[in-house]
Amino acid sequence: MKSLQYILRDIPIAESVNFADVAVNYIRFDSRKVEQGDVFIAVKGTLTDGHNFIIQAIKQGAAAIICEKLPKTAISINSPVLVRVEDSHNALGKAASNYYERPSEKLKLVGVTGTNGKTTVVTLLFQLFRSLGFKAGLLSTIENRINEQTYSATHTTPDPVKINELLNKMVAEKVHYCFMEVSSHAIHQKRIAGLHFDGAVFTNITQDHLDYHQTFKNYLYAKKALFDSLPSDSWALVNADDKNGKVMVQNTKARKHSFALQTASDFKTKIIENRVEGLHLNIDQQDIWFKLAGRFNASNLLAVYGAAMLMQQDKQQILSNLSMLDAAEGRFEVIKGKNVRVILDYAHTPDALKNVLETLRKSRTGKEQLITVTGAGGNRDKGKRPLMAGIAAEYSDKVILTADNPRDEDPEVIINEMLEGLDESAQEKVLRIASRREAIKTACMLARKGDVVLVAGKGHEKYQEIKGVRYPFDDKAQIKQFIK
């Protein structure tokens, strides 16, 4: 139990009714879960507005309500404590942090943001610091980890209450470092309000999530807000090869650092060899072989190296341990059949798809075909659909357009919109198979000895979302079945 006054620390209060320093059982932002003695914080979501459920929360025993607009029907001498704030999203983040006694200040929290590479960078950082002997935590798209304990992940960045609950568990387990993916949605929705970051990494930014942010500028500035909020005792590490790296740190108070493959930067690398089996890199004048493949992973590895150096780790130990690590699940994951190699990758943006296909194209040793299976998610940025089809056709010998997570849309309509990015000659190398299972099966059947198949878009996901239902579906399991 915490007192309401304790929960409200550093949260500006615009107005209050019946204020008393009541005991708080728990913090809720879902009215359906409110129990006796809870604080209900009403936030506006993309689909529903918590303010519409304040009366319900009161009936269920809420001890206090925090909201942006006081409901007239709730104001009475017998109503619970009512607190009006200017921004209830910000209040939720800070209240959650206060409730768990500000756990982010009791460990070193590092946030990683960008369009592509977030999962790979945080996973490698987590694995690296575990190998260096530290207790570590991970908050990622694939999973949440506290040392060896795994917790399921439903979002790239959890809600504020869940974040602080997990951080609090990490503190209890004496975790020293936590590495966290920070999505643009989470930043914009202030899910990270109240968190203290010791450092932040920017990987890159390309078109994505414009269904939510509407414009690329909005998307860019959502990412930038993470760096704007960094305290002066933290560090910021940005990709200098991306012109928007400079934008990220324009207003930051943090110490500024950069990494790059091509541009002058604090941390540099040179690609000596790039094969499907791995990368031979020269990082800060030292030659190292890594298990990860692709130019994009050279950048990811350099980001991890730079971040570890900024956290005062030994250079030789970083490089030695990093060379032994594998990529995150579903990120350029190679599945070998008797005669065919299949690459499983989460690439679901034009830039990510291009990066993977360029790597595969350059790794060719003969006349082997490159067959690509890809789709586009429903209820998401429609502008990237024709771009992705165009990239797939440009770099592949055969393309199969299929369903990704169609959500509320018709997969055939999505495929039609993807085909708009292809001219007549490009369309000749394309098959359309809406069933993802049949698409993967067909690609494996078409592949001859030595050919490479890329199955892109879903990576680690173990489901396919159709009409609001998540049906079990695992690309990796399907691939293994069809390449036997």
Image (cartoon, helix red, strand yellow):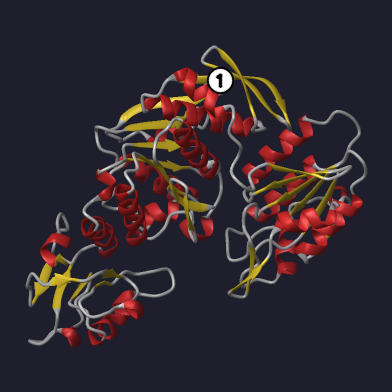
Observer-nearest of 35 and 146: 146
Q: Secondary structure at mark 1?
A: strand
Horizontal side of 21 relative to 239 (left or right) equals: left
- Report the amino acid beneath label 1: Thr
For residue 324, above or below residue 113: above
- Which residue sits furthest top? 285
> How far across and how far down the image is residue 14, in percent?
13, 65
Q: Residue at x 51, y 41 (%)?
A: 123
* Residue 430 appears anywhere in the view: no
* Residue 150 appears anywhere in the view: yes
> How far across and how far down the image is residue 187, in percent?
38, 52
Q: Residue at x 42, y 30 (%)?
A: 307
Q: Which residue is mark 1?
A: 269
> How far across and how far down the image is residue 2, in percent?
16, 64
Observer-nearest of 424 and 176: 176
> How far across and how far down the image is residue 174, in percent?
31, 44
